[in-house]
Image (cartoon, grey):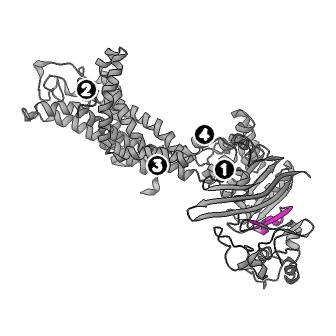
């Protein structure tokens, strides 16, 4: 399938009083039309900053997109003018945020908020936008949609608000939906519902999805491809199946070891990854995962490994990935 | 309504609201309410104590005090409304721009505000009013508006421009703070992610969320404006007699013959009390409004 979005060597920095925070350090990835890409990593690893950079929503200053290209349908979004990027936002690329409790404007009715993009991008009248808003709310499974249009966000539960957010994001039938930890703030049953809604709508509308999460469990049933990020780098990239069956980066391995599994004997212990990610102001010269790595070697301290091929469309940034593959023990198949 | 209920349950705020309502009605219906014209002199009835014909007595030119106080409300309310409009027109967009764009826009606007704040407030108003007035009068005469000069309406313009020009800084600073806080909120980033243009993000998504502190600040500010108008008129750079202003009524009566006729102290007290009541009313009401709109701060 054709490539929809291609991010090349993206670098984003924040210039703070304490120094320059290197939040994203040369990230490259691509999303095909209709594909679902999972971005996985712990807090502060640059997942959100990467996609906010794609949308040019980084606060500038202190933020700065220091380099790279974001090619969306062949156009470099980092080079277009403000007017043009606004016509892409919400129209071609839409976003759903983490916390549904704070992502809706508390003083506007949800009808007004859903209508906004419709009137803006599709030039609908208030009447048309209202009608379409009802359809959208029905699509995301909000009961009695007609009666809820004039309600304010505080009259909705967290899960319902996230549905509203999804309805807003989908209002202009975007080609790419960016979901920034959309289920993190919700309880588990609601999480599953939201995942199902996005899966269904993705199938119906044929849009591509970038799903950001720190929870590999959520992404397992959703993504075609998974990028694991660490300290502003993509450190492993492979198909969904491959990541779970054949992880070759020690960090990915660590992530997998720290999620509970239902199909294992209950004696199996969760193994946390010891230590903390590196200071993004004073980036280590070598591999950013060096301090926490069980497989580290001398070379890792001085040279940061580039991404190299470790299998079919499987890239990893580790000098010792072959060693990791040999020593890691059984990973188990989902 | 919830808000009205909360204010009604707060005695000082309710009192403040009633006084404000009364003053507003006095201002609107002054010609109907005042028993005499504010400048109607009657030397045969000068310096009278309160009586059924003159409820608040008369001054040394025989002008009816009640009528002058009622018309004074019209002056005060007119100045309050106009100055508040200027404060809003300058403070809201400038404060919002400073907060939203930051950088040199912020630096420029906020340094101007700092300059406004660096001077003792009223002194600066005096300076502006005193230097502005001859300029405006000369300009009006030069283009042949002698009638306008004589009418005294230009005095209102001087007062309004002086108070408005100095007073917007506080509002701008407050709005800037609110915008700084709100622009990082997720729903604002969300609106931008939907492709909403910047001016619309500010006008529809940011400012409506800052409406509570803005309303409270304006309400409190109105009391200050009434007081400042009183000061200016008292000191003779504001509204000039015979135009009725609580400040110049006070000055007239205090200066001219309070010492000679100490028994006529009410002529000084009445405009002073009215002015004080209005200032208190706005402050009480503003406080009540603040509590009613932010129930959690109690």
Q: Nearer the viewer, mark 4 or mark 3?
A: 4
Residue A187 appears in the picture as rendered? yes
Q: Quadrant of residue A248?
A: bottom right
Tags 1 and 2 on a common chain: yes
Q: Does the CB distance between marks 4 and 3 fall below 8 Å?
A: no
Could you say which is closer to the camera, residue A22 or residue B296? A22
The chain ID associated with circle 1 is B
Residue in view at x 65 percent, y 45 percent: A110
The chain ID associated with circle 4 is B
Q: Earlier in the sequence, mark 4 or mark 2?
A: 4
Q: Nearer the viewer, mark 1 or mark 2?
A: 2
Q: Nearer the viewer, mark 3 or mark 1?
A: 1
Highlighted magenta segment, given as a residue range? A216-233
Q: Does the CB distance between marks 4 and 1 fall below 8 Å?
A: no
Compared to residue B108, the image places residue B132 above or below, namely above
Instruction: Please name the residue that numbered disc 4 is placed on.
Output: B199
- Secondary structure under the numbered disc 1 in the rendered image: helix
Task: Report crowding for label 3: few under 14, some 14 to 19, many 20 or more residues within 10 A (C-alpha).
Answer: some
Tell me how far mark 4 sits from mark 3, CA to CA: 26 Å
Instruction: Please name the residue that numbered disc 2 is placed on.
Output: B240
């Amino acid at each position: 399938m054709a490539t929809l979005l291609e991010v090349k060597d993206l670098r984003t920095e924040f210039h703070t009083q304490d120094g320059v925070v290197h939040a994203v350090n040369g990230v490259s990835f691509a999303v095909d039309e209709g594909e679902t890409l999972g971005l996985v990593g712990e807090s502060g690893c640059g997942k959100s900053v990467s996609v906010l950079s794609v949308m040019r929503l980084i606060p500038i200053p202190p933020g700065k997109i220091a380099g790279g290209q974001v090619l969306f349908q062949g156009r470099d979004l980092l080079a277009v003018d403000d007017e043009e990027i606004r016509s892409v936002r919400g129209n071609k690329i839409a976003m759903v945020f983490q916390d549904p409790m704070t992502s809706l404007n508390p003083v506007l009715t949800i009808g007004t908020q859903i209508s906004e993009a419709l009137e803006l991008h599709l030039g609908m009248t208030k009447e048309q936008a209202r009608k379409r808003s009802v359809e959208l709310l029905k699509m995301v499974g909000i009961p009695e949609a007609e009666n809820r249009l004039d309600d304010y966000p505080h009259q909705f539960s967290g899960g319902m608000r996230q549905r509203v957010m999804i309805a807003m994001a989908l209002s202009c039938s975007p080609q790419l939906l960016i979901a920034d930890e959309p289920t993190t703030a919700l309880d588990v049953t609601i999480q599953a519902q939201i995942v199902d809604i996005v899966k269904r709508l993705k199938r119906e509308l044929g849009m591509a999805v970038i799903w950001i999460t720190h929870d590999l469990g959520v992404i397992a049933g959703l993504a075609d491809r998974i990028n694991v990020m660490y300290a502003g780098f993509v450190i492993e990239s492979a198909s969904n199946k491959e990541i779970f069956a054949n992880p070759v980066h020690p960090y990915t391995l660590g992530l997998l070891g720290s999620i509970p599994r239902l199909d294992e004997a209950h004696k199996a212990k969760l193994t946390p990854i010891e230590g903390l990610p590196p200071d993004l102001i004073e980036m280590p010269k070598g591999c950013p995962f060096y301090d926490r790595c069980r497989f580290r070697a001398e070379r890792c301290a001085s040279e940061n490994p580039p991404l190299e091929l470790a299998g079919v469309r499987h890239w990893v940034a580790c000098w010792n990935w072959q060693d990791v593959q040999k020593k890691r023990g059984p990973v188990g198949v989902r | 309504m919830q808000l009205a209920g909360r204010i009604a349950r707060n005695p000082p705020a309710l009192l403040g609201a009633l006084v404000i309502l009364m003053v507003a009605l006095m201002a609107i219906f002054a010609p109907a309410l005042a028993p005499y014209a504010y400048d109607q002199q009657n030397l045969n009835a000068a310096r009278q104590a309160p009586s059924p014909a003159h409820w608040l007595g008369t001054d040394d030119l025989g002008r009816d005090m009640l009528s002058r106080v009622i018309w004074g409300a019209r002056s005060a309310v007119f100045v309050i409304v106009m100055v508040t409009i200027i404060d809003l027109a300058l403070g809201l967009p400038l404060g919002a721009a400073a907060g939203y764009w930051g950088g040199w826009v912020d630096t420029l606007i906020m340094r101007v505000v700092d300059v406004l704040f660096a001077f003792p407030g009223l002194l600066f108003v005096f300076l502006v009013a005193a230097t502005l007035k001859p300029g405006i009068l000369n300009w009006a005469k030069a283009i042949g508006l002698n009638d306008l000069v004589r009418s005294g309406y230009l005095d209102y313009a001087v007062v309004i421009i002086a108070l408005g020009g100095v007073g917007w800084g506080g509002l701008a600073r407050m709005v800037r703070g609110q915008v700084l806080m709100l622009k990082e909120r997720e729903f604002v980033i969300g609106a931008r992610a939907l492709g909403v243009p910047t001016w619309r993000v500010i006008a529809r998504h940011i400012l409506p969320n800052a409406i509570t502190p803005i309303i409270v600040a304006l309400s409190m500010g109105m009391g200050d404006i009434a007081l400042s108008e009183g000061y200016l008129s008292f000191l003779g750079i504001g509204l000039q007699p015979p135009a009725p202003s609580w400040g110049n009524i006070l000055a007239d009566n205090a200066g001219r013959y309070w010492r000679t006729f100490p028994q006529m102290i009410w002529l000084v007290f009445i405009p002073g009390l009215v002015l004080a009541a209005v200032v208190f009313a706005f402050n009480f009401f503003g406080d009540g409004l603040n509590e009613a709109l932010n129930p959690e701060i109690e």
